Image: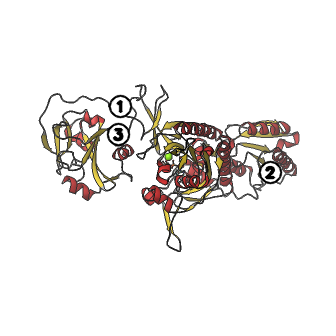
């Protein structure tokens, strides 16, 4: 492709609403353009990268024996109503009505549709195991679309679903997908970690996420270098740590604490450490309110808590007026004593002695509180966020934490959807059984953003060869120079003939501008045809290298072909 003909509207300025590098660079390099919050168009370069990611996914899915099909994105509501997810997705689902007032949605994920297809189309148990997949556009009305295509409202996902006769079959289908995922992310040049993930309150026997470690990742990961344990925060088991508390059975005392609301203010007021306090947070859990308590230096993990309660919707902090109604106090003074709702207590709180809590009275706290003497928790469980300084639940060594971008998720669903929708089969002996399912997702568009987050420098993207929109850019320094242009054309044609996707920068721009653009758009290899071309010498530079090398034309072409082919 000739740069003079390519739609590549690069921007010198960084768009103001882009917070992270991948988003900034995709806009600046003319890969994507925003249409509305979380909705993007793919311009030619962005689309080429996206298609390459799709193709890697497709090849590896096919290699693993999965079959591709394609479902509609505009879906009738009935099947989601049957599974209960019409309600569960709530505002996250784009819902609409047709001219006859029938409910439809734009598919956020397709478990129900695949289950229904298998119910309708599979005739015999002999057809299992079967894994079906599609690469398709998904719609989710995310509460906080941000970071460009990383968390968008329209995105491309590969979703696969496995159907097996029994648990053993599921284990095998799951293993195949696990291996395919490892190959996919490796081919994409991503540095990834596999973590144990939460399989939710609704059942499922196992789940893992493929995470790209990155400071801009929205998921917390806990990992242990000593034994290899890795889990996301929702799943990471917290081992209670011990702290020193005043000895003895001290008597409960109500202390006046005017204008003292936060843990920081309490610490200053009482002149003690945060772990001497237990904080009580009131949540709305579906249609009821509950209280949850963690130590003052800890945070509640709302997903752990949600799963424990078994509620359908995400937990929400109780509205201030409800906090006032339930505790008879302003926000900041809640405590479990005399509170008339269920109280969930973290394992660590259960070990505390003579500690401090809110008194359910504005301007007061209780001191020397002891569990079971002063209040009785309804449930004691691990409901907190793991932190650096915690110990590994597997080997006891110190845990480390980092942020990750979830690029893929594999999940043993079990019978959740097959039971809800009636996907059964009759086995060899004529016995009726329920089909066991797994589901496997990859955020294809998110993978591009993740790859950029891991591969950029001050000048732009440094894309892995496998995801770059073009492999090589041939740059004549001066396109008025006939000899340079002729040679550049020859190199360009030669590369294309050998299956290398080459760009020719034939624009009448200054060389500096051409180099800047080539760097910005992340082309992995640049061949510059300059003054020395009459000696048969060109400049060869890998995008990731600091300095160019001089090579003869033949050598440059030969090296380019072998470099690109070995990195695909
Ligand atoms: P997240 O926790 O990031 O919201 P999820 O767990 O809801 O993701 P899944 O339902 O597991 O996502 O979807 C499969 C894959 O689709 C995810 O692993 C992720 O890579 C991708 N994905 C999910 N939501 C988005 C989004 N809003 N924008 C881009 N990719 C997404
Ligand atoms: Mg997920």
Crowding at label 2, few (<14), some or many (≥20) Cα neighbours within 10 Å?
A: some
Q: Position of residue 276 (x, y in %)?
A: 24, 36
| Number of numbered tags placed on the structure image | 3
Element type at marker 3?
loop
Asked if residue 259 lies left or right of residue 412, the reply is left
Residue labelled with disc 1: 239
Q: Position of residue 268 (x, y in %)?
A: 23, 40
The response on whether ligand 1 sits within 8 Å of label 1 is no
Q: Residue at x 43, y 28 (%)?
A: 394
> Which label's residue is closer to the chain start, 1 or 2?
1
Badge 3 density bin: few <14, some 14–19, many ≥20, Cα 10 Å: many
Q: Which of the marked residues, 2 or 3, is nearer the chain's N terminus? A: 3
Q: Which residue is mark 3?
A: 384
Quarter of the image holding residue 256?
Answer: top left
Vertical relation: 387 (above or below) 159: above
Q: Marks 2/3: CA distance? A: 63 Å
Is residue 482 visible to the viewer in this orientation of the structure? yes
* Residue 496 placement (x, y as % from top left): 81, 47
Q: Which mark is residue 368?
A: none
Q: Residue at x 68, y 37 (%)?
A: 545
Where 24 falls versus 215 (above or below)?
A: below
Q: Position of residue 524 (x, y in %)?
A: 70, 43
Q: Residues within 10 Å of mark 1 (few under 14, many from 20)?
A: some
Gap in angstroms between the C-alphas marked 3 and 1: 10 Å
Disc number placed over residue 478 in the picture, else none: 2
- Would residue 153 appear left or right of 131 to someone viewing this image? left
Report the front residue among 333 and 177. 177
Q: Nearer the viewer, mark 1 or mark 2?
A: 1
Residue 304 found in image quarter: top left
Question: What secondary structure is marked by label 1?
Answer: loop
């Amino acid at each position: 492709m000739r740069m003079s003909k390519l739609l590549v509207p690069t921007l010198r300025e960084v768009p103001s609403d882009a917070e992270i590098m991948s988003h900034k660079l995709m806009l600046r390099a003319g890969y994507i353009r925003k249409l509305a919050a979380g909705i993007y168009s793919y311009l030619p370069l962005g689309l080429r990268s996206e298609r390459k990611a799709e193709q890697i996914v497709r090849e590896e899915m096919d290699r693993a024996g999965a079959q591709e099909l394609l479902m509609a994105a505009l879906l009738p509501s009935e099947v989601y109503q049957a599974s209960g997810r019409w309600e569960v997705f709530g505002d996250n689902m784009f819902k609409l009505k047709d001219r006859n007032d029938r409910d439809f949605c734009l598919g956020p994920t397709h478990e129900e549709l695949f289950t229904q297809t298998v119910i309708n189309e599979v005739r015999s148990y002999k057809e299992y195991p079967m894994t079906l997949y599609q690469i398709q556009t998904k719609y989710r009305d995310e509460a906080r679309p941000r970071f460009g295509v990383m968390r968008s409202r329209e995105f491309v996902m590969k979703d696969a679903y496995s159907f097996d006769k029994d648990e053993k079959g599921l284990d095998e289908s799951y293993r195949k997908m696990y291996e395919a995922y490892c190959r996919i992310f490796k081919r994409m040049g991503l540095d990834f970690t596999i973590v144990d993930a939460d399989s939710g309150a609704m059942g499922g026997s196992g789940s893992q996420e493929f995470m790209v470690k990155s400071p801009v990742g929205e998921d917390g990961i806990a990992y242990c270098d000593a034994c290899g344990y890795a889990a996301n925060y929702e799943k990471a088991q917290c081992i209670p740590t011990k702290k020193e508390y005043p000895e003895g059975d001290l008597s409960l005392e109500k202390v006046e604490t005017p204008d003292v609301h936060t843990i920081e203010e309490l610490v200053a007021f009482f002149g003690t450490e945060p772990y001497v306090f237990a904080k009580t947070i009131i949540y709305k859990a579906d249609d009821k309110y509950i209280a949850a308590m963690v130590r003052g230096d800890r945070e509640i993990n709302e997903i752990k808590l949600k799963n424990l309660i078994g509620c359908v919707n995400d937990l929400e902090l109780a509205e201030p007026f409800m906090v006032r109604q339930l505790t008879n106090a302003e926000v900041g003074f809640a405590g479990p004593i005399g509170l008339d709702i269920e109280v969930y207590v973290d394992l660590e709180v259960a070990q505390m002695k003579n500690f401090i809590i809110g008194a359910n009275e504005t301007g007061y706290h209780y001191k020397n509180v002891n569990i079971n003497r002063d209040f009785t928790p309804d449930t004691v469980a691990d409901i907190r966020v793991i932190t650096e300084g915690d110990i590994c639940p597997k080997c006891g060594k110190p845990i480390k934490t980092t942020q990750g971008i979830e690029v893929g998720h594999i999940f043993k669903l079990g019978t959740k959807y097959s039971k809800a929708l009636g996907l059964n089969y009759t086995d060899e002996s004529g016995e009726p059984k329920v089909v066991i399912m797994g589901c496997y997702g990859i955020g294809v568009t998110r993978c591009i953003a993740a790859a950029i987050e891991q591969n950029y420098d001050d000048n732009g993207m440094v894309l892995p060869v496998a995801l770059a929109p073009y492999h090589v850019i041939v740059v004549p320094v001066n396109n008025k120079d006939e000899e340079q242009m002729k040679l550049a054309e020859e190199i360009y044609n030669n590369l294309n003939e050998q299956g290398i996707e080459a760009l020719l920068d034939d624009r009448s721009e200054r060389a500096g501008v051409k180099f800047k653009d080539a760097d910005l758009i992340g082309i992995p290899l640049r061949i510059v045809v300059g003054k020395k071309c009459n000696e048969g010498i060109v400049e060869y530079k890998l995008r990731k290298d600091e300095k160019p090398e001089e090579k003869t034309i033949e050598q440059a072409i030969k090296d380019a072909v072998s470099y690109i082919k070995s990195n695909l």
